[in-house]
Every structure is written in structure tokens, then in C-alpha cells.
Amino acid sequence: MIPNILTIAGTDPTGGAGIQADLKTFSALGGYGMSVVTALVAQNTRGVDRVFDVPADFVRAQLDSVFADARVDAVKIGMLGDVDVIKTVAGALDDHSPPHVVLDPVMVAKSGDRLLRPDAVATLRDVLVPRASLITPNLPEAADLLGEPEATTADAMAAQLHRLGVLGVSRILLKGGHLRGEHSTDLLLADGTVHRFDAERVDTVNTHGTGCTLSSAIATLRPQRGDWLTAVSEAKAYLTGTLRHADELDVGGGHGPVHHFHELWER
């Protein structure tokens, strides 16, 4: 059975991140993509120019329309923007109870532009994080959630992983791409056990949307693989492949997108 995967996130007109990247990832990995838009973002590979937040009541209307008609096998949550939308999404999760919820706590774009208002961080942490099956913060996002400086060493990263564990979510994938080294290491804390994933650090500037792509890949694979460890492992391998082939694309003059469909286009 083809899984139906719902993304709740903002847009990216150049297609490398946000809902556009999520839908590409769902399709590349055998899922049927559905979407609820939380924000319209005027951005490109160089940065964010403007954000228009979708009113919370209309976000709720979109969510209720999807859940009233379609089976939802997994949900991926990305950019939410403000407190009202965060609370609205949390309420919809309570009412509709999707089986798997992957939360990518999007706070800052690849360009450095902030996408989550500072006053909304506490609401995200206290209201939405406990409702997720898995969260996928990078190191700056983990620091924001914890209210402490960003980890700059592997030991500090591991310590932050365990501190994140007290936020009420049973599974955390802490992404270590911001650390230096030949390899990029992610740590998965699942039900009290830490699993380490090492991947080659691909030499490319085209890394726009990597967080969206990874979280979407996990959400798509979890219903198909039956356990989180396998889903995360295969999602990591997929992301590495999209990075290896990213330079085959020519999109924009900043941080370009990864190549979501490289395997399909090769065939």
C-alpha cells in the first residue's frame, strides 16, 4: 500500500526547501504527498525576503479537510512561524491522532534568516515537541530549544542530545552537520538507546533544504519500513545521494537545492 504523507510547512518558490522539497522527497521514496501551507515565503537560494503567515484558523481548516477525507500514514512538520499556528497544529494532532509525526523544528533558514519568532520557541518546545514521534533538530536548533550555546564538539553534542531527552519526546535525531570534519555524524536517541550515523561530508554548496529533505524522508519511510532505526538509516543514505548529485542542478546563485530525483532521472 502506498503511504499517504502529509507535510505541514511553509513554501519555497525556488523549490529547494519547505513544502516543495517535502513533496519531492515523498514522491522519490514511494509516498503520496499531501500538504498544508502554514506560511508563504518569498525566498530563493540567497535568502528570505518576506514571510506571510497563513492565519491559524485557515491552517486548521486545511488540516481538517485533509483528515476528514484521506488516510494519513505519517505527518512531517516544518516551518510554523508563530504561537497561534503551533497551538493549532498541536490541537489538530490531538484530534486526529496520526500514527507517526516527524517534527523538524525549523527556526533559521540556510541563509541565516530567522523563520521562527523568538517568542514562539518556548511554545514549540513545550506544546508541540511532546506530541512528536521524532524530532530532527540541527545543532543551532537544539541550542535554541535548550536555551544554551550551540555545541561545537562531539562531546557537547552528545550531552545536548540527552538534555533534549527531558523535553517529553521519546526519539530525537540530533544532526551534527555544523561540526567540522570529513564525516557528518548524527545521533539518534530512541527509547533510551543512542545510535550513531556517520556519513561522508559531500563537498558542495548546494545544501538548501537538507533538513526538510531528511525529515520528509524519515516520515515517508517509517510506514514502509516498520521501525524508526531502519527509516532513519535509509533516509540518511537517501540524503547523502541527493547531496552527491546536487551539483548536477543549476538553480540560483546561493545555496542551491539537493537533487531529489537523481535516481529516477538516471533511469
Image: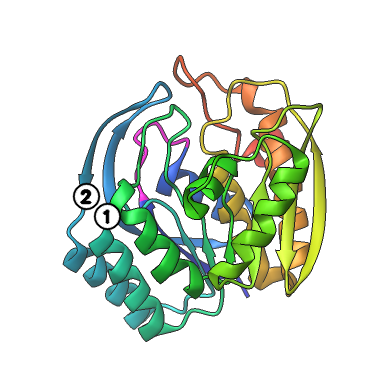
- Badge 1 crowding class, 10 Å Cα cut-off, few under 14, some 14 to 19, many 20 or more, is many
Q: Position of residue 74 (x, y in %)?
A: 53, 70
Residue that appears at 76% across and 29% down? 201
Q: What residue is disc 1 on?
A: 82
Q: What residue is disc 2 on?
A: 53
Tell me which segment is drawn in magenta: 10-16
Whether residue 75 sits left or right of residue 191 in the image: it is: left
Location of the C terminus by quadrant is top right
Q: Is residue 254 visible?
A: yes
Which circle, 1 or 2, is nearer the viewer? 1
Dividing the picture into quadrants, the one containing residue 232 is bottom right
Q: Is residue 64 depicted above or below 241 in this figure?
A: below
Q: Position of residue 266 (x, y in %)?
A: 71, 34
- Badge 2 crowding class, 10 Å Cα cut-off, few under 14, some 14 to 19, many 20 or more, is some
Q: Is residue 81 depicted above or below 257 in this figure?
A: below
Residue that appears at 57% across and 23% down? 249
Location of the N terminus by quadrant is bottom right
